[in-house]
Amino acid sequence: MKNNKKKLILLFCILSVSYFFSLETKAQGILSGGSIHGNFQMDAQLYVEDSVINAPDVSEDMLMNGFSNLIYTNGKFTAGLRYEVYLNPMLGYDYRLKGSGIPYRFASFKSDDFEITVGNFYEQFGSGLVLRSYEEWNLGIDNSIDGINIKFKPYKGVTIKGVYGNQRYYWEKSKGIIRGIDGEVFVNDLFTGLAEMKTKITLGGSMVSVFQENDPSLMLNLPLNVAAFAGRMNINRGKVNFMAEYANKINDPESLNNFIYKNGEALLVSGSYSQKGLGIMFSAKRIDNMVYKSDRKEIGNSLDVNFLPPLTKQHVYSLATMYPYATQPNGEMGYQAQVIYTIPKKSKLGGRYGTTISVNYSQVNSIDKQKIDTIPIGEYGTKGYTSDFFKFGDIVYNKDFNIEISRKLNKKWKAILAYTNLAYNIEVVEGHAGEPMVYADIFILDITHKFTPTKALRLEYQQLFTKQDEGDWLAAILEFTIAPKWFLSISDQYNYGNPHSDKKIHYYMAAMGYTKGTSRIALSYGRQREGLVCVGGVCRVVPASNGLTLTISSSF
Amino acid sequence: MKYFKISILLTVILSIVIFSCDKVDPPYLADQPEPPDTAACPIPDFPDISNYERIILLEEFTGHTCQNCPEGTLLAHELKEEYGEKLILVSIHAGGFAVPKPDDPGYEIDLRTETGDLLLEEFSASFFPSAMFNRSKINNLWALPTMWWEGVLDTMMTVGPTIGMQMITDFDDSDRKLCIHIKSKYLQDLSNTLMLSVYILEDSIQSAQKNDNPNIGYPTPDIIDYWHNHVLRGPINNPWGSLVPGSPYLKDSTLITTFKYFLNDDWKAKHCNVVAFIYDANTKVVLQAVEAKVIGEE
């Protein structure tokens, strides 16, 4: 019944767009000359109870998440849908995803200077400080907007975007309605005298408003329309680039800020210089009370209207990702600097193929918060607190110094050497009350040997030293690749430094994969340790598990 | 001309969005109750208590035309017998099953309240019978099916109290004035904002009730002389209570809150109870509850 309803809606969308743009589409022939493309993925795991790692007993034995996108394109017309199935949701994914259906369907028409989409869509204004709807399969996040999205280019260099709709909430929709507008001007195009100027300037501004009905249970005089504004600029001149974006959100009492009425603020500044062999980047940000959701009572990862970009390195090696930093939207202030330098080829230091060195440092602290009169900071139904915009708070949330040296030794050997020094506030980031700051040193060696142009063996050895949390770890992976089709690997993570002898556990894993064209099948068996999976500063808790995992993906 | 058009366009768009913004000025808290009339309701001495127990609030959603509800109510009473004063029962008559039927003898009575309807909607009670336990969300449900009740209660009973509560009532039959004094003692530091809700309940209301289970000692399909107990009659302060002042609440500090209330003429004072509970304003989870009769034991 639900599916039939959705099919009818899709049909309605297609008919609506085809009606409004009938002249254009008739000329092209909506049912001829079109093409269909899409992709498919299925992740399934057969769970094995494992009391050693506290892997829970899964009554279904096997759980599966899957999706498929189908996109039909015909000239200026596009329509599509995504089918999703969670039977039942894999461990670590929200159980409200249970079921199957078509949560995403759309139809759109695009001409040179005009685009309209009805149905579901993803959109981002600037860096996303006031609006970003996106989908991240690995986190189980999809906050697509269901409504209308219009993009319009009235003049050369000017782009205006508008959105209006509800967000997806698992198999339902958000209570709040999002309305937003974004304008961006490429100044050099707008003024003919600046067209040839070497300095390129882009200016932009966004406004978003979320409407939600009153909620008497909160005993508050609530704002029913919560607006956020942002302004941004990007200046580029040759090798130098500078961008800045500032956002302000008007009083938005909601669960995650304990229903305070303070305005929210976010500032993001970034500068970079790049030339052949050298890249320098510096960025800084300040976030204060910037949770922005389309339901003021939502406390999970769902229904985020905005996105607060991370300012720490996104590590890829497994032990370096053990303590991932998650953005603290209620308040954080930090900076990041990075230098990437390639020592030239055939130099004494650089060797025959050159050597690349990357050094990165980031630090994130709390923000300054002061009481208003004698009212405790953050008290329910108050202004909350005041904050000195330029003052760092005393609490360190995260410090990350890392250096990576990558060098091709000869035609057969390639090596990467990396070191990371972390200070991680596990109490704030993961909510482990009372736990001390984690100080960790992580060493990584990654060596690849190519036997032939298609066959390679890679060894990854990692060691993490810390006196806090679970103590020291080591990890090793041995991976054999027969490009472009096969890979085989075995790996282990060993918590040999755990202060509890019964928790000195091996997390072994064996995996293999086969790729043909755009299709891939991967199979792995072993233990998955409990932890956080983060993408772009947004994290999902992954419980410990043991078992056989199958992933099949394809695109067409 | 080009810039004029852009300006017009931007002005229209700006206007639309700016008007979609509500700036709220203090006070932010919705209307709070009048200050207590301590002249009319002098504060009594509370007996000293050294060991508080955590009291669980069970709020059952029910209705007289709900055929499965007598079975749920029976289960709630069995749990009450097992846990005694550690469990407080509240029967919320709300929704379609509680609608009075003027043409159906025995079902003319209206036990619904505005508060009950608000609770039904707020806590998404979509099936009957169902019950909330301390308004805790379990498996994304506030109102839980009967098969979960015993297990949830067993688990909750293992957790100790964070707040101690006492209540003393004083009822004047001549003008039906009811003084309610509630003493709260924080057993640990609490930083979250707390609310205090106070409800009036009435026992021993006799009317009809549908029933489809002959194995629970009642006739089917109608129980003509069914006794409705713990029936929610209404709030003393308001459906969502009032703010507990003094956040953050420091360990061992105490607060006495007094309410003056006039009991409805239609309610039998000797069958009425007062239930008070403190809950977390943000999560809605009830931290402690207390119950007292309107007319104390003689």
Image (cartoon, grey):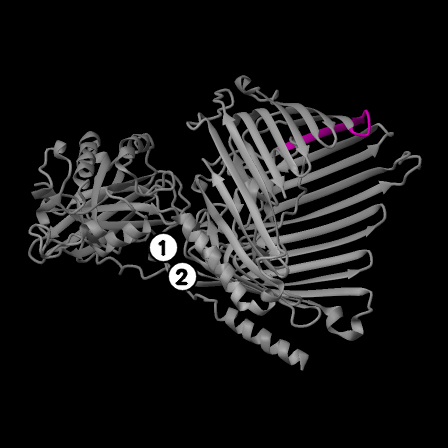
Identify the secondary structure beneath mark 1.
Answer: helix
The prevailing secondary structure element of the residues shown in magenta is strand
Q: Which mark is residue A218?
A: 1
In terms of depth relative to the viewer, which is nearer, A470 or B151?
Answer: B151
Q: Chain of mark 2?
A: A
Is there any visible trace of residue A91 in the rendered image?
Answer: no
Q: Position of residue B199 (x, y in %)?
A: 22, 50
Is there any visible trace of residue B272 in the rendered image?
Answer: yes
Amino acid type of disc 2?
Leu
Q: Position of residue A114 (x, y in %)?
A: 62, 67
Asked if disc 2 and disc 1 are in contact, CB closer than 8 Å, the reply is yes
- The vertical placement of A139 against A79, above or below, is above
Q: Quadrant of residue B41?
A: bottom left
Q: Which span is picked out in magenta?
A: A439-454
In terms of depth relative to the viewer, which is nearer, B244 or B215?
Answer: B215
Q: Which mark is residue A222?
A: 2
Identify the residue at horizontal 6%, vertical 52% (top origin): B105
Amino acid type of disc 1?
Leu
Q: Quadrant of residue A153?
A: bottom right
> How far is mark 2 from mark 1, CA to CA?
9 Å
- The vertical placement of B118 against A451, above or below, is below
